[in-house]
Image: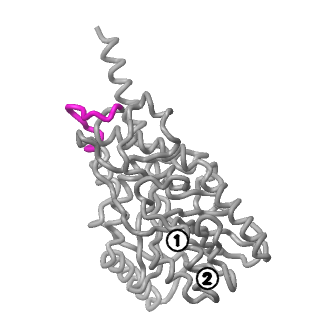
Amino acid sequence: MILPGNKTDLLRKVLDVKEACRVSVASRAAMCRVYNLWIETGRSSGQRALVNKLYGHIDRLAAHLFSPTELRFVLDFEAHYPAETLEQGETTARVLTREWERKDIDILFAAAVPVALSYGAAILKQMWGHSGLEARTIMPWQFGVYREDVNNIEDQEALCESGMMTLEEVWRRISHLPNADKLYARIISHARKDAGETMAGSFFHNVLSTSILNTSLADARAQPGGIVQLSGDGSGATAPGPEFKIDLIPFHELYVKDDAKGDYTTVLLIEPDILVSPFFKRENMFAPGTQPFSLVQPNYVPGYFWGRSEIIEQRRALRAVLLLHHRTP
């Protein structure tokens, strides 16, 4: 992908790429809401079933797929090297394993597995922080790719993470830039204290809502496109979600393959159209030649990046069992 050098053209290009990456966010978030109801309650109506085996199935299958206690990194070599080099490789593998253990990255990866089983995919993001390597799990409705018919995340022209920042985080990102005070004033004019509640008029209205919704499957298509219920209702059908009473800023962080530099370029866009980076020069904020996102996906589907939810497989199997029982004399 060729990124324009002019600031105005660059902003226009970034906005187009962001929209291309997020084209299916609303529909995917709506489906995730339905999957969550099935898992938490066992029914599409939101009322708890007397016996719900879906949650237990997801939890048990995730434990079989990955266990943090069995995590071990190994560095292998295709060519023959001196014994000293092989010993260095063994030491590096031990250090990497211990680093994952110290930073609880193994636990985060384990937590991403049931998310991926439930919704088809999850994203693990690794970044460099003040204490070294850090990681966190990104939900599938917070992430977008340039082409959903390409399975390999490394083959994507652009990757887009969407989320919220506090004002303190925003200032740390822009404090080194010229005219940072003016830029900060422009950014805080778009801050919202109700970001976790309604986010009316914002792109995040399609992702998060802590208001109580009608979550029956029959009326799911009549609901706003991508609302995901995070708060519990009176029956306790779903677990409560986060609540905010601070100023939050919607942002998009993109990693774009920049043909001009032969590497990824990190782009930080703050809603609605404030381009924070690249400012002076185009850089890869993670590591040369790679990007920080890893796809966690137990149920691979050729030609579809987001995979298949385990819930679909279980409901299909249950339907087959009920049909067989109905036909059996």
* Helix, strand or loop under label 2: helix
| C-alpha distance separating marks 1 and 2 | 31 Å
Amino acid at circle 1: Pro
Percent from the top left, x then y, of residue 176? 57, 89
Residue 319 is a magenta residue: no
Q: Are marks 1 and 2 in contact (CB under 8 Å)?
A: no
Residue positioned 28% across, 49% down in the render: 239
Residue denoted by label 1: 292
Residue denoted by label 2: 182
Q: In the picture shown, does residue 127 fall above or below 190?
A: below
What secondary structure characterizes most of the magenta part? loop
Percent from the top left, x then y, of residue 261? 73, 79
Amino acid at circle 2: Lys
Residue extent of the magenta highlight: 45-56
319 or 256, which lies in front? 256
Tell me: 13 left or right of 286.
right
Residue positioned 39% across, 79% down in the render: 96
Q: In the picture shown, does residue 139 fall above or below 99?
A: above
Tell me: 229 left or right of 140.
left
Residue positioned 36% across, 32% down in the render: 44
